C-alpha cells in the first residue's frame, strides 16, 4: 500500500527507526522483515574511528529513502544547524524536526518547533514535525507550510500506544488533506493498527521493534498490523451499536419460536 | 591556537582553514558535515573558511536514529 509523500512514492506506510538494536545484524534483519517505506537516521559526532561510516554502509544497502532527525535538539538554532548538516550528508531536504522541551517526557516544545519549522521551510526543507496532538499547534504548522504532521501517540519509547485517541481523531478529521503520521509511543502492533484504522497515513516507530525479544519478528508483526489497519480503514469499519444485531438471517429459520 | 572539536579542546598551528582541520583529524573523504560556532558550513566552503582561536567545531556523521 504505497504512500505519496513529499516528492516520493513510498512502498510502505511503516517508517522504521534504526536506533537501539542489539546488533547491526539485528537491525539489518529487522529492516528485511519490516520492508519499511523509509528509515529514520540521525547525526552524531564523528571521530577518525569512522563509526558513522560503518552504520551508513548498512543503511545504504537497502536503497530506501531516509528521514534524518534532529533528535536531542532543544534550541531553534541547534535544530536548524543539525537539519542543514543532515541535508548535506543524506542528500535529502526531508527532516524530522524534533525540538524537545522536557527531558522527562521528551515532549516537543511547540513554540520552538514553530520557529524552527518556519526557518527550515524558508530554507527549502520538507519538514516532518514531531509534535504533540494539539489542534492549534497543527493549525500553526500547516499555516507555515507543513504538508506532513507527526503527532505523538505517547512519549518516545514509552510503548503506551495512543494516549489521546480523541485528539488524534480530531486531527485526522480537521486535516483530511494532510499526511498524518503517528510518531512515538507505539508499543504493540495493535496500537499501530488502531491508528491506521483511524485513517492515519503511516506509523513511525523504533523502540517497539529494537527492544523486542525478537526484533525481526516484531518488525514483521508491525508490518502486518499497519497493512491490516490501512485495509480496514479503506474498507469502512462499522459503527459500534448499543444492542445486538443477529448476523445470521432469521428468515426461514426452522422451528421458529416453536414451544416445546 | 586552541580550537574545540566535538567538545575536545585541541591545539593547532595557525593559520588554518576548515579543510586543514579536517585533514589533521583524518576525516577528509568521509561522510561528514561540519558546523562552526553553531553555524553550518557547506562542504564547498571548507577551503575558504578560516578557523580562529577559540572556535567551536562540530563534525558529524550518520548515526542510528528513531
Image (tube, coloured by chain):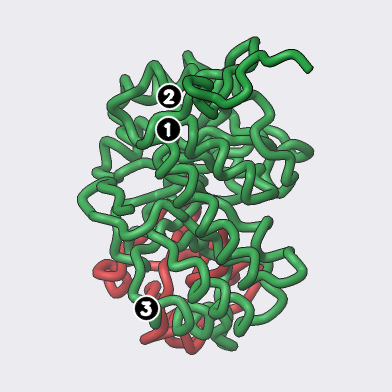
Chain colours: A green, B red
How crowded pointer 1 is (Cα within 10 Å; few <14, some 14-19, many 20+) is rated as: many
Rendered residue at 64%/70% (across/down)? A217
Looking at the image, residue B12 sits to the left or right of residue B50; the answer is right
Q: CA distance from mark 3 to mark 1?
A: 49 Å
Secondary structure state at the residue bearing disc 1: loop
Residue identified by numbered label 3? B19
Q: Is label 2 in a helix, a strand or a loop?
A: helix
Q: Secondary structure at mark 3?
A: helix
Residue at position x 35%, y 30% from top? A118
Viewer-side label of 3, 1? 1
- Quarter of the figure with the N terminus of chain B: bottom right
> Separation of disc 2 and disc 1 at Cα?
7 Å
- Residue beneath the point at 43% across and 86% down: B23
The answer to whether residue A169 is seen in the rendering is yes
Please give the label number shown on residue A199. Answer: 1
- Whole-angstrom CA distance, mark 2 to mark 3, is 48 Å
Where does the image place residue B41, in percent across and percent down from the top left? 35, 61
Q: Position of residue B35 (x, y in %)?
A: 45, 60
Q: Is residue A86 above or below residue A199?
A: below
Instruction: Nearest to the eye among marks 2 and 1: give it.
Output: 1
Q: Is residue A256 left or right of residue A31?
A: right
Check contact, mark 2 vs mark 1: CB within 8 A: yes
Q: Residue at x 33, y 75 (%)?
A: A63
Location of the C terminus of chain B (image quadrant): bottom right
Q: Earlier in the sequence, mark 2 or mark 1?
A: 2
**A202 and B8: which is toward the camera:** A202
To which residue does mark 2 refer?
A172
Crowd class of label 3 (few under 14; some 14 to 19; many from 20; radius 10 Å): some
User: For the residues tagged 3 and 1, is the chain the same?
Assistant: no
Amino acid at each position: 500500500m504505497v504512500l505519496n509523500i513529499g516528492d516520493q512514492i513510498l512502498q510502505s506506510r511503516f517508517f522504521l527507526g534504526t536506533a537501539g538494536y542489539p546488533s547491526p545484524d539485528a537491525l539489518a534483519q529487522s529492516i528485511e522483515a519490516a520492508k519499511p517505506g523509509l528509515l529514520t537516521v540521525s547525526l552524531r559526532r564523528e571521530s577518525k574511528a569512522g563509526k558513522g561510516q560503518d552504520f551508513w554502509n548498512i543503511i545504504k544497502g537497502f536503497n530506501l529513502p531516509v528521514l534524518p532527525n534532529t533528535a536531542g535538539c532543544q534550541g531553534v538554532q541547534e535544530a536548524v544547524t543539525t537539519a542543514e548538516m543532515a541535508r548535506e550528508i543524506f542528500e535529502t531536504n526531508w527532516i524530522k524536526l524534533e525540538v524537545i522541551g522536557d527531558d522527562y517526557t521528551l515532549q516537543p516544545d511547540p513554540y520552538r518547533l514553530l520557529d524552527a519549522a518556519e526557518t527550515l521551510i524558508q530554507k527549502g526543507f520538507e519538514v516532518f514535525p514531531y509534535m504533540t496532538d494539539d489542534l492549534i499547534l497543527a493549525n500553526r504548522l500547516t499555516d507555515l507550510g507543513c504538508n506532513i504532521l507527526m503527532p505523538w501517540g505517547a512519549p518516545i519509547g514509552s510503548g503506551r500506544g495512543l494516549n489521546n485517541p480523541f485528539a488524534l481523531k480530531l486531527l485526522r478529521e480537521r486535516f483530511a488533506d494532510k499526511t498524518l503520521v503517528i510518531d512515538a509511543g507505539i508499543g504493540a502492533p495493535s496500537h499501530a493498527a488502531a491508528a491506521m484504522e483511524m485513517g492515519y497515513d503511516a506509523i513511525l516507530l523504533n523502540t517497539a521493534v529494537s527492544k523486542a525479544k525478537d526484533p525481526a519478528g516484531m518488525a514483521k508483526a508491525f508490518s502486518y498490523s499497519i497493512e491490516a489497519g490501512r485495509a480496514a480503514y479503506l474498507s469502512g469499519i462499522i459503527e459500534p451499536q448499543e444492542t445486538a444485531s443477529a448476523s445470521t438471517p432469521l428468515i426461514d429459520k426452522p422451528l421458529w419460536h416453536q414451544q416445546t | 591556537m586552541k580550537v574545540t572539536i566535538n567538545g575536545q579542546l585541541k591545539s593547532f598551528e595557525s593559520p588554518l582553514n576548515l579543510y586543514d582541520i579536517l585533514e589533521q583529524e583524518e576525516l577528509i573523504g568521509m561522510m561528514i558535515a561540519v558546523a562552526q560556532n553553531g553555524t553550518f558550513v557547506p562542504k564547498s566552503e571548507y577551503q575558504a573558511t578560516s578557523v580562529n582561536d577559540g572556535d567551536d567545531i562540530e563534525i558529524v556523521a550518520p548515526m542510528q536514529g528513531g
